[in-house]
Amino acid sequence: MTALVILIAAFFTAILSAMLGMAGGLVLMGVLALILPVSAAMVTHGAVQSVSNGWRALLLRRFVMWRTLGFYLAGSAMAALGLLAVQFALDRAWLLIALGCVPFLVWLPAGRWSLDASRPVHGVAAGFLVTGLNVIAGVSGPLLDVFFQNTDVDRRAIVATKAASQVAAHGVKIAYYVGPAIAVSDSGLIWLIALALPLSVAGTTLGARVLAHMCEVMFRRWTNRVVTVIGLVYLEMGMAELLGGG
């Protein structure tokens, strides 16, 4: 039953991510955190999301902002080097609370910060901060979205570039948690990930077709609303577990 829930979640969250550019990873991380040890959840999430994001970037490759991606990768590499010096992992209650807080980043006032991932300094900062948050909380899509609020491109370029950049962030997360995950898991986790990957590809393909028919206003409006509701649910769950002692 546990495996079935994870496989179903991998498929439907891939659809959601392909439609909105995030949210799917947020939902999947919460599902995995409730079922698996935190380190195993991080590795499973990273593997599934790497394939989902990688396939999404491939489907939309002609829209990827390659120069912007280069800035992001430079910042991501800096974060990876910094993370080599520390070993850090939240327990499940605090992980859920962190997941609940992350979505509210989408409501940061765009005009006040004037962030634009296509600018070199902002792109490097995005790579550094997004990769770091991805390792700590498991997800970072809403923070990445903040850096695209003032980027004057259409929804497909945003989704494509975010997808390509998230492959790097999830790769760092996998490398960070793979040792602890192996220590607490058995070979069944590898088979589970292997089964989830093609479902993630199928869901991404279906979601990309829906994205092609969405208007810009609907895309931006529903992205913020969906992730905010998800965040409120995680906050309630995390606080309940923390106050209830697990």
Image (cartoon, helix red, strand yellow):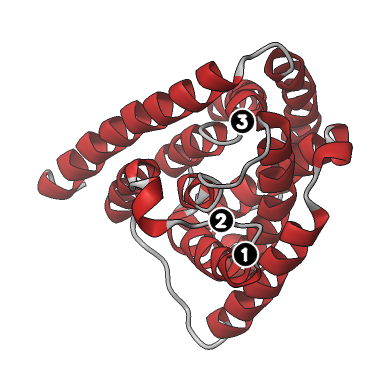
Q: Secondary structure at mark 1?
A: helix
- Rendering quarter of residue 168: bottom right
Foreground mark, 3 or 2, reads 2
Work out whether 129 lies above or below 86: above
168 horizontally vs 99: left or right:
right
Work out whether 180 lies above or below 155: below
Q: Residue furthest left?
A: 243
For residue 17, which numbered disc appears in the image? Answer: 3
- Rendering quarter of residue 70: bottom right
Q: How much space separates mark 1 and mark 3, taking CA atoms? A: 22 Å
Sequence order check, earlier mark of 1 and 2: 2
Q: Secondary structure at mark 3?
A: helix
Q: Tell me the amino acid under the disc marked 2.
A: Asp
How far across and down, in percent of the image, does residue 184 sit? 54, 60
Q: Nearer the viewer, residue 183 or 22?
A: 22
162 horizontally vs 144: left or right:
right
170 horizontally vs 195: left or right:
left
Q: How much space separates mark 1 and mark 2, taking CA atoms? A: 7 Å
Q: Residue at x 61, y 57 (%)?
A: 117
Work out whether 186 lies above or below 16: below
Work out whether 243 lies above or below 198: below
Total marks placed:
3
Q: Which residue is mark 1?
A: 123
Q: Which residue is mark 2?
A: 116
CB-based contact (under 8 Å), mark 1 and mark 2: no
How far across and down, in percent of the image, does residue 72 sit? 67, 64
- Rendering quarter of residue 64: top right
Q: Residue at x 48, y 83 (%)?
A: 86
Sequence order check, earlier mark of 3 and 2: 3
Q: In this rendering, does residue 72 appear at all?
A: yes
